[in-house]
Image (cartoon, rainbow, N blue to C red):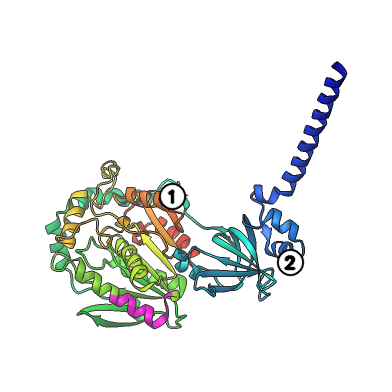
Amino acid sequence: MIKIFKKRINSATIAIMLLLIAGIVYAKDLRIMNTKEILPVKELQNAFMYDRPKAEKLYKNKMVTITGVVVYVGPDVYGLPSIEVSDKKDGASMALCVLPISDYLKLRKYSKGHTLVIKGEARDIYKESIVIVKECKVIEEKGKTYGMKTISNEKEPSTESQQLEKRLFLAGVKNNTFAQTVKNDRAKPATKPTPELYNKYDIASELINGQNVWTIAPKKSINKYFFFIHGGAYVSTYFPEHWVFFGKLIERTGRTVVTPDYPLAPEHQYAETTEMVYTALLNLINEVGAENVILIGDSAGGGMAFALAQKLRDEKDVQPSQIILLSPLLDMTKSNPEIVEVDKYDPILSVERSTECSKAYAGNTDPKNYLLSPIYGNIKNLAPIILFTGTHDILFPDCKKLSQMAEKENVDLTYCEYKDMLHVWLILPVPEADEALDQLVGLLV
């Protein structure tokens, strides 16, 4: 009995060892499935074409992460958004990667020749040489990871910035009432490009709904455009700093600036303003192509730009090449509790005046309407977004909130946060303005 029992134990032990060894070998075979290893598309194709058992075991109906060069971007035979990749530029298609139908607008990011890393579920071979990969998501392009990215500038403010902040506090800019703000703006002469811009660039204007739309173009145009919506709390027209900033944009990029001088509150409200700006934007897109237009705005104009990008997506199924938001006003309700603390450090904006300006612009419309407060809209399936914000700005907490939303929703947003910088510091005469502009230009596509 004892001997027989020992033999049984030995047999059982051997059987277990054999199972463990088999498991280790099997796990080794599955290493691609169970790790984040990136598979060259040709290796995936070879498995399905020449090593069917391997394809069945490792890849078929399993999630894979592949890399390849784009040879086609557009609808597949069923009209679904798709990207075909090969192992080389202009090579034969080796994998057809089908994206969710909701990702149609994202296709405009990619072009033939781009090297992508794509994750999806490998299905089977098609037409004897193309592997079908479903439910795909692009996770990287030439080393660029998609999704929310944060760029923080933690340097102490320059002496010039600190002195400007003190002067603004001493001047009581923050304490101007709504009535004073409107009165001061209406007392200004009619706004137009500066003599310096006229001397250096080709300038033209056209009327839309009785309002000027200015075009400021370099002498040698490259058919690339900024559509710039200026800030001013909806009640003020351009500041002199805007025109200087337009000149810097043109000089640094060679792009033409198109900017609408939109109707202002309280004489006009958001529906009229939105219609005029949206018409001007559509005119430009129809003339030069959405891929050649960057939609950009500062402060209230930044909020308007973000809202109109959502409107473009919903109504025209189109997007500009990028969306740039400079200290944008994203939520006119000012309900973010963190604003109260930041208000102590902002020498330009006050919650009270900003709220009054917003109410004059919104009228009786719900302030959470996405055309007024775009943070309440659908932020998915938009063009890549670049956002600049400074921490001494009452609009900063909502910018931070948008970055957190973008991270959660995997929205392509580059969030640039500058320590102790003021509202729309990019257009102010401080060293950090040029630093941020250099950074902005480096992020353009």
The foreground one among 330 and 391 is 330
Question: What segment carries the magenta color?
Answer: 279-290
Left or right of 441 in this view: 426: left
* Disc 2, SS: helix
User: Is residue 245 among what the camera can see?
Assistant: no
Residue found at the very far top of the displayed protein: 2
Q: Name the residue under label 1.
A: 408
Q: Quadrant of the N terminus?
A: top right
Q: Is residue 201 above or below residue 353?
A: below
What label does residue 82 carry, if any? Answer: none
Residue drawn 30% across the image and 55% down it: 376
The foreground one among 208 and 186 is 208
Residue drawn 77% across the image and 32% down it: 16
- Where residue 59 sits, quadrant-wise, is bottom right
Q: How far apart are marks 2 and 1 (CA)?
A: 39 Å
Q: Position of residue 426 (x, y in %)?
A: 37, 59
Left or right of 439 in this view: 295: left
Q: Where is residue 165 in the image (x, y as percent from the top left)?
A: 30, 50
Is the magenta region chiefly helix, strand or loop? helix
